[in-house]
């Protein structure tokens, strides 16, 4: 990244990490679901305010139909790539998209 570049710009390692995280079809789908959590998770009663903390991991797991351990690993990968943010509410972890990071990813792809 050049000096004076936009602070939110992704360096090559961050860009590759985000692309690798999204290369898995389930992880990609989860990020899409989190774009409109009220619609995507309408069948699940929110544990907390989805606009503030996101979607409970148990609801993501139920919708994905995968083992809890698999979903936890997927969410950790997405979080490490900066694509989602987590918040603890009691004993539950909630996830929401990192819109700033996704905008940076979009810009980086556009600038290729």
Image (cartoon, rainbow, N blue to C red):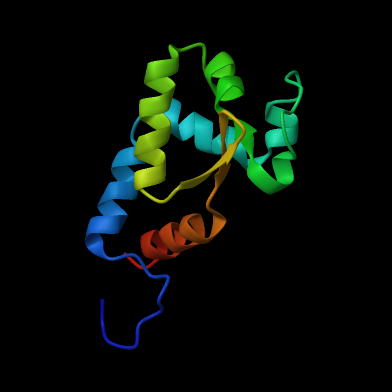
Residue 8, image x and y in percent?
Answer: 42, 70
Residue 1, image x and y in percent?
Answer: 26, 76
Q: Is residue 4 left or right of residue 86?
A: left
- The quadrant holding residue 70 is top left
Q: Is residue 49 above or below residue 9?
A: above
Q: Which residue is drawn at the image coordinates 45% and 12% (left, top)?
A: 66
Q: Which residue is drawn at the image coordinates 62% and 32% (left, top)?
A: 90
Q: Is residue 59 left or right of residue 109?
A: right
* Quadrant placement of the C terminus: bottom left
**In the depicted view, which residue is nearer to us: 107 or 45?**
45
Residue 2, image x and y in percent?
Answer: 26, 82
Q: Which residue is drawn at the image coordinates 44% and 65% (left, top)?
A: 107
Q: Can the viewer see residue 25 in this picture?
A: no
Q: Residue furthest bottom?
A: 4
- The quadrant holding residue 14 is bottom left
**In the depicted view, which residue is nearer to us: 103 or 51?**
51
Q: Is residue 1 above or below residue 52?
A: below
**In the depicted view, which residue is nearer to us: 106 or 49?**
49
Q: Can the viewer see residue 73 in this picture?
A: yes
């Amino acid at each position: 990244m050049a000096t004076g570049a936009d602070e939110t710009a992704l360096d090559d390692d961050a860009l590759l990490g985000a692309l690798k995280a999204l290369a898995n079809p389930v992880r990609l789908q989860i990020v899409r679901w989190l774009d409109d959590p009220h619609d995507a998770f309408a069948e699940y009663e929110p544990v907390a305010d989805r606009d503030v903390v996101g979607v409970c991991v148990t609801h993501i797991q139920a919708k994905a139909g995968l083992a809890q351990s698999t979903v936890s690993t997927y969410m950790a990968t997405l979080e490490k790539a900066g694509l989602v943010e987590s918040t603890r509410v009691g004993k539950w972890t909630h996830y929401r998209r990192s819109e700033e990071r996704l905008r940076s990813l979009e810009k980086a792809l556009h600038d290729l």
